[in-house]
Image: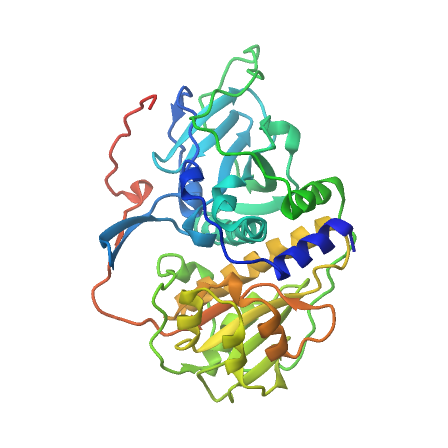
Amino acid sequence: MTDAAARYVAAMADRGPLDIRWDLAPLRHKRYPSAEWVEPRHPLGALLRGMLGITRVIWRHTDAGPMAIPGRPAPSGGGLYPIEAYVACPDGLFHYDPVHEVLEVLRTGDHGPARICLTAVFWRSMFKYGDYAYRLICQEIGVLRTQAEVVAATLGLTVTPGDADHALLGLDESRESPLAVLHLEPYERVLPPEPADAPRNSGDLPREARPLPLPFPPGAARDLHRAADATSRARRPSPPARGIRIPAEVVDLRDGLRARHSPVDGFRPAPVPLTKIAAIAGLAVCPDLDLYLLALRVDGLPRAAYHYDGDLRRVRAAPLEELGSAPLVANTREALKTAAAVIVPVGDPLAGTARDHRDQLVETGASLQRATLAAAALGLTSRIHSDGAGEATDRVLGLTGPARSLSSLLVGVPRSRGPDLVLRFPDPQEGGPKARPQHTDQ
């Protein structure tokens, strides 16, 4: 256990209501206005688009009138998308601009084996969620890792996670810091070959668009981040326990990529077959976490709390209405009324080092994204509700030791099978039309 992790866990347990400073909200995506643009070739372009691209528009009707909201392929806490992607490869160093679907050339020359570097712009999430944003950011890194692995599988690519390289990007790490690296194979050139004696551009990065996001504010989250960067892993994941597996449907996560969406208005209050819930839970299992299930409307499974490790073991038949005593946001409270099941990753956040704590949050996101894609592939829908983890959920699960709920995924039947209110953009690299972006310095 580290002091930084202990202070952060205590601060998150005692956090108050949100104090949102909308007037301090930063730019929604990063740009380098003076950088040259390069169109990423297939399959790299399709991989980046499948991770972070703007792939659809969601139409919603609110009290303020109709809204058109740009949507991305993978979920993000509050829809704030604090993660940026850079590509380092033998051709150079590039930043991915998801709005224009181009790579911005930051440096030329050989920058080593091909990899995608994922960074966090902290203030893009912290202006709304404060220190709690760090938990969401780490979870989102895991979500994107799973998304990259599944998208890569459709493109004939292999993605292998690695450690972040802080020296490579030359960022102002008070505002933006590397958190993960995804190594890519096979590699195809981004730029035309240069002469062997061509000078490598290794100077400062181009100037990024203003205004800059505010720096990482002092507090428990910044202390945890610095401690995690300064320490190494102590724990070694153990293989997941094997029990007698209950029947489950066969699922290909690639089938869930296009169908995935996060319902904002809950679910249709209809039961879901146990075979589907078993398939979703089975794909959410990972070595470093325990997995629990709250059965609300599951055919063949009594309403109760269960531990899942290949088979289901009932741990408590406590009234699940206890969850209503938690300080949940409105959409979580409403979604619980209609969900069929809740999948809850559980771990000990104070075991090991500060790096272990951060890695555990990343694994939580990776686990829940696998479950999210599995649900979509099975014709269901789901939404990550991180505020669903807390003392009330721990009581319902019967957790009395150091282990705690880390997040939650609500799963259910889509509310409507009527006209789709999501306009999906075709992938230009699959033959769809593409408007040529106009490069401006604005």
Residue 377 locus on image (x, y percent): 40, 66
Q: Which one is in front, 376 or 349?
A: 349
Q: Please tell me whether residue 402 is drawn above or below residue 316 in the rendered image.
A: above
Q: Which one is in front, 336 or 328?
A: 328
Residue drawn at x 64%, y 67% as measured from the top left? 346
Residue 338 locus on image (x, y percent): 39, 77
Q: In this view, does 183 lie to the left or right of 76?
A: right
Q: How is the image coloured?
A: rainbow
- For residue 357, which quarter of the picture? bottom right
Residue 109 locus on image (x, y percent): 55, 19
Q: Please tell me whether residue 312 is drawn above or below residue 258 in the rendered image.
A: below
Residue drawn at x 56%, y 26% as measured from the top left? 90
- For residue 429, which quarter of the picture? top left
In which quadrant of the rendered image does the N terminus lie?
bottom right
Residue 32 locus on image (x, y percent): 43, 25
Q: Please tell me whether residue 326 is drawn above or below residue 271 in the rendered image.
A: above
Residue 375 seen in the current view: yes
Q: Is residue 416 left or right of residue 210?
A: left
In which quadrant of the rendered image does the C terminus lie?
top left
Q: Which one is in front, 266 or 107?
A: 266
Q: In this view, does 226 lie to the left or right of 298?
A: right
Residue drawn at x 49%, y 38% as measured from the top left? 84
